[in-house]
Image: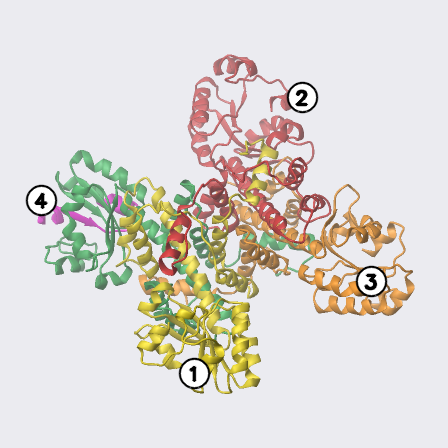
Chain colours: A yellow, B red, C orange, D green
């Protein structure tokens, strides 16, 4: 991301645990190299690492500086974090970043939570990171809204991927459709289901037309779970988003205790054969 | 089932492909041994075997005789079958039979489709087969209604089993609950979820407290699929019944093409590691 | 519940905010009337009310006394509560209680979390409350396991009810089945789906054969949500339990924002008519 | 569609029940105006109307002519139709057409079923109808594969729309996100969930930021149902696609019989209040 900001003509000082990627030796040096009012973008794994980095920065920064967390923090961390920084006069913005490994080239979609005046002040950074066109940036709401919007984005992403996956599986099971990759490819233009994910599915099928080199094993990074937790908290029906995360859980099970129980029941009442 | 009818004091002539279980050599002899008006109970695998048996009987029986299909025919077979028998004066009843291997002892729940006067005529057979109490028998409706009611019964059965299965799986994953079989057992009396299926789950856990001797592999015999097909035809939301049958499909897959596609997509956009 | 304990020959002192149901004026008097080592059963709404009652009791009780929370506390409250009471020498048990309004007559299913020696000491209370037979009681595990087991019980209950509900809805939509209440009733004996809930569905249909006096509006009391939250935390696929809670959410919506979005999309791409 | 074909320089004779849209008075005149070997594109409502049109054409056409059904026929109609036409020497292709009302401008995604030599012969028509780029056309497989691929396309479309709808509903329920339309808009570029459907959702929100002018009532045209029927027939788990169609059913219900049954059960066991 530094490259995109530099390319837009802004000065950037980078700090990384890997010295070869780092312009400075530590956070103190990083802060000292920047002119106040500073903007510091943190992008480290969610949880304790992010909290530690922000706490350390809070001890080094001055009133008027802004910390921007672009990592995958849970949205519930942001409000308390902003509250902790407020007495020191340090501003806080949370940013959900989408785009994957393609963002470096295409720009990143950015969803921001925090106060409007703080957003306005660092808008040049966001403009440098976002795609060139009119989309790819939103001030979503108050502290936490950026990570919240990104979380929902990921929940939707899970649902879309599962919809493509299920459709794909029916297609390859069909007796009539003989060229599934061609069908997927045809949808890339003119169809209602065209999307970037579909382009990538086509790309994957170009590389491996039967996906035989892959196992149907899918991890999850938390946002899909949080999305369903939120659906439940807010009493929003979310059959599709929940099913998508459950299918990922299933994909990682060698055997299903639930289905063992069902098999046991069938055997008990019907004498149905079981597999051992 | 013959035993239960005989035990109730009725004369029964049985025919079976296995001569050792058979009182007669063929259907013609079966018909000749019974006094008109006859009642013939067919209980053979659904589909062509049942159709063939009924067609053969139709050529042997006389007006006023009744054919009762107690097999697992699809409900859509019953109406046309009754229509074909009608011009010959042969009556037809379809009977859904529940009870599994326990019915011999406890009696079978019977759901019957057809005309009320035909049901009334063979009520003594139904009374001999059903449990002793006030329940276990219904004249559900017109031709097909017996198999229909049994189909829905099985759909519900799938849903109940899946509910128990999922609850069981969460329990055994819990860090707090150390004695899952005891919890299941406790529910057998006094709880809202007490049921015969729960009794059987407890029985299975008595035999194998961790179900370690089983694989989570579950077949299906068609009724659950037909139930969801009907839900779709009738525009009835059936999230739970559909999920229950889909989970059985999943339980039988070595790998999931849908989840391969999802894994491929994650790799494409995020560079996420995949399993090969 | 006091009546069942008294009926078993135990002395009970009851305290209630309603003086007419109360043997004493306040908790201090309650404690003073009992001989140490005491057993105090709290059964008040989950959350702050329960916490306040237990905190007040903690100031009144002596080492060796036991507090038993039979309310619907969330299982995550129990461990910390037990830890807080431990330095005072006060023991703690959490009990999930099932049985609804029928428990007074039939006994309650009890699932208990806590230390085995504490469970043993108050077993006579549990024996007085549970059904007469061999079932209806379990020492589920450590602190929290009682409420946890009850939570899962309720999650399963939601799934079973939804399975019956969906099956019922298909039955009444069918063109063939003319007597749905009779079908439900027939399942009460001899069938695989027989259960206490089914008995109650039959009872409801006896009172109102088309349920026309009810709206399809269903509240939830939290346990179903927590069950799905746990499924998600523990990576347990729970399609059926989640769908059951989502259907309750849907039942309470006048209009669905999600389906508005879907309607808007259909109109956008296909010019499909929308309802306004 | 005629306009796109004419614009590509091909001669077209159109027939329509509305004389003002019709170049000829009836199918016989249509056939007489075309030089053999002819290609006739039918695009009328699925079912009897399509069958009648094709049967009438079959009596008018000559060996070597091709009938192309671009309507929404069910895939199971195509094989038998091709078989019926074969003895007359008339070729048959089925074409699934996607693109909605936007296809006239952008081109249509076309999925074709039938024999390769027949596809090749009418490729110029497909080329005139498809989008300008390299995508938007596939020879999917044998007779029926075109409609099959389009059916799956629609099933996926339902799933994607439901995923967006659920995510949208959580967003508007959130306490943190204050500008939901801006969030949706931001995803149009740089995000993983960018798609044409998302562009249309943004368009709908531009017109009506709260969708307050719409009811959450969503019809379905059959393909989503057939997709789930196929999933069930082929034993493919399809939680997401099934949930999407069930949610449409729910959106059209004034009250839910299933949830009435659940409400009745809660009242029976727990004395819970019900709505009447």
Q: Which chain carries label 2?
A: B
Q: What element carries label 1?
A: helix
Q: Mark 3 lies on which chain?
A: C
Q: Are marks 3 and 2 on the same chain?
A: no
C-alpha distance separating marks 4 and 2: 77 Å
Q: Do the residues labelled 4 and 2 touch (CB within 8 Å)?
A: no
- The image position of residue B126, as x and y in percent, is 61, 29
Q: Which numbered marker is on residue B7?
A: 2
Mark 2, residues whose alpha carbon is within 10 Å: few (<14), some, or many (≥20)? few
Q: Is residue B219 magenta?
A: no
For residue D164, above or below residue D125: below
Q: Nearer the viewer, residue C193 or C138?
A: C138
For residue A108, above or below residue D257: below
- The image position of residue D159, as x and y in percent, is 40, 56
The span shown in magenta is: D28-53
C-alpha distance separating marks 1 and 2: 97 Å
| Residue at x-position 43% and y-position 57% | A159
Tally of numbered tags: 4
The residue tagged 1 is A33
Mark 3, residues whose alpha carbon is within 10 Å: few (<14), some, or many (≥20)? some
Q: Nearer the viewer, mark 1 or mark 2?
A: 1
Res D39 visible: yes
Q: Which numbered marker is on residue C89?
A: 3
C-alpha distance separating marks 1 and 4: 81 Å
Q: From the image, which quarter does the N terminus of chain C lie in? A: bottom right
Q: Nearer the viewer, mark 3 or mark 4?
A: 3
- The image position of residue B194, as x and y in percent, is 68, 45
The residue tagged 4 is D36
């Amino acid at each position: 991301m530094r490259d995109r900001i530099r390319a837009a003509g802004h000065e950037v000082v980078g700090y990384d645990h890997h010295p070869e990627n780092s312009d400075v030796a530590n956070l103190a040096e990083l802060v000292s190299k920047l002119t106040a009012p500073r903007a510091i973008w943190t992008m480290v794994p969610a949880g304790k690492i992010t909290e530690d980095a922000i706490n350390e920065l809070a001890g080094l920064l001055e009133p008027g500086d802004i910390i921007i967390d672009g990592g995958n923090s849970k949205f519930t961390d942001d409000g308390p974090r902003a509250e902790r920084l407020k007495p020191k006069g340090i501003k806080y913005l949370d940013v959900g970043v989408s785009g994957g490994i393609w963002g470096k080239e295409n720009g990143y979609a950015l969803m921001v939570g925090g106060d409007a005046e703080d957003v306005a002040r660092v808008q040049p950074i966001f403009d440098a990171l976002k795609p060139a066109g009119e989309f790819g940036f939103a001030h979503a709401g108050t502290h936490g809204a950026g990570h919240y919007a990104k979380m929902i984005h990921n929940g939707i992403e899970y649902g879309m991927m599962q919809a493509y996956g299920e459709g794909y599986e029916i297609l390859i099971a069909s007796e009539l459709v003989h060229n599934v990759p061609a069908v997927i490819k045809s949808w890339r233009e003119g169809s209602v289901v065209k999307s970037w994910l579909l382009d990538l599915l086509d790309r994957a099928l170009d590389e491996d037309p039967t996906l035989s080199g892959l196992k149907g094993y899918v991890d999850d990074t938390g946002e899909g779970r949080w999305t369903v937790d939120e659906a439940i908290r807010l009493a929003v029906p979310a059959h599709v988003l929940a099913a998508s995360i459950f299918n990922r859980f299933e994909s990682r099970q060698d055997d299903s205790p639930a289905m063992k129980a069902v098999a046991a029941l069938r055997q008990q009442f019907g004498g149905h054969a079981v597999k051992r």
